[in-house]
Amino acid sequence: MSDQSYLQQIQSIEGKVHQLVQQFQAEQERLQAAHQEIARLQQVIQDKDAEIKNFQNQDNISKIVQTIAVDTTNSTELKLKINEYLREIDKCIAYLRD
């Protein structure tokens, strides 16, 4: 084989290696994006779980208030106070997350 033939083969191999490197880098970027999306979705799941727990707690508190409170005035006041406490707790939780 001539030097020209070897040079063409080397250039061909270099071109293919370059393509492979580009493909590899593109796949790495896609993988990184997928990992970021997974992390984002996990955070969404955690947030939704917290919301569900909050709603469950509010429901449980409402049931307790209805059981404890005898007259409607006390019941309403108690519900308002508990809801105020829950809002403050939610603010604290949000602050701690940040």
Image (spheres, rainbow, N blue to C red):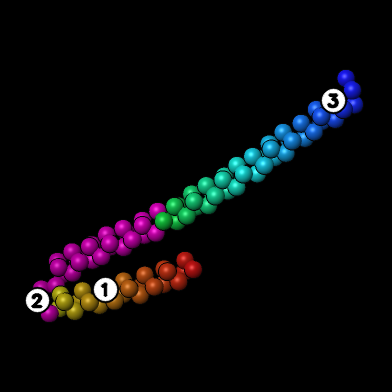
Which secondary structure type mostly characterizes the magenta part of the structure?
helix
Q: Which mark is residue 83?
A: 1
- At 41% across and 56% down in the image, what residue appears? 44
Q: Position of residue 4 (x, y in %)?
A: 87, 27
Distance from the alpha carbon under mark 3 to that under mark 1: 82 Å
The residue under label 3 is 5
Q: Amino acid at mark 2?
A: Asp
With respect to residue 15, does 67 lie above or below? below
Residue 17 inside the magenta-drawn segment: no
Q: Amino acid at mark 1?
A: Asn
Tell me the amino acid under the disc marked 3: Ser
Q: Which residue is farthest right?
A: 3
Q: Mark 3 against mark 1, which lies toward the viewer?
A: 3
Q: Position of residue 10 (x, y in %)?
A: 82, 30
Does 8 sit above or below residue 58?
above
Mark 2 or mark 1: which is in front?
1
> Between disc 2 and disc 1, whose residue precedes?
2
The residue wearing badge 2 is 71
Does residue 69 appear left or right of residue 52 in this picture? Answer: left
Q: Please rate how many residues cluster around mark 1, counting C-alpha atoms within 10 Å: few if below 14, some from 14 to 19, many from 20.
A: some
2 lies above or below 64 = above
State the SS at label 3.
helix
Q: Residues within 10 Å of mark 3 (few under 14, many from 20)?
A: few
**Is tag 2's residue or tag 3's residue first in the polypeptide sequence?**
3
**Magenta segment boundaries in residue numbering:** 45-73
Q: Mark 3 vs mark 1: which is more N-terminal? A: 3
Is 24 displayed left or right of 82 in the figure? right
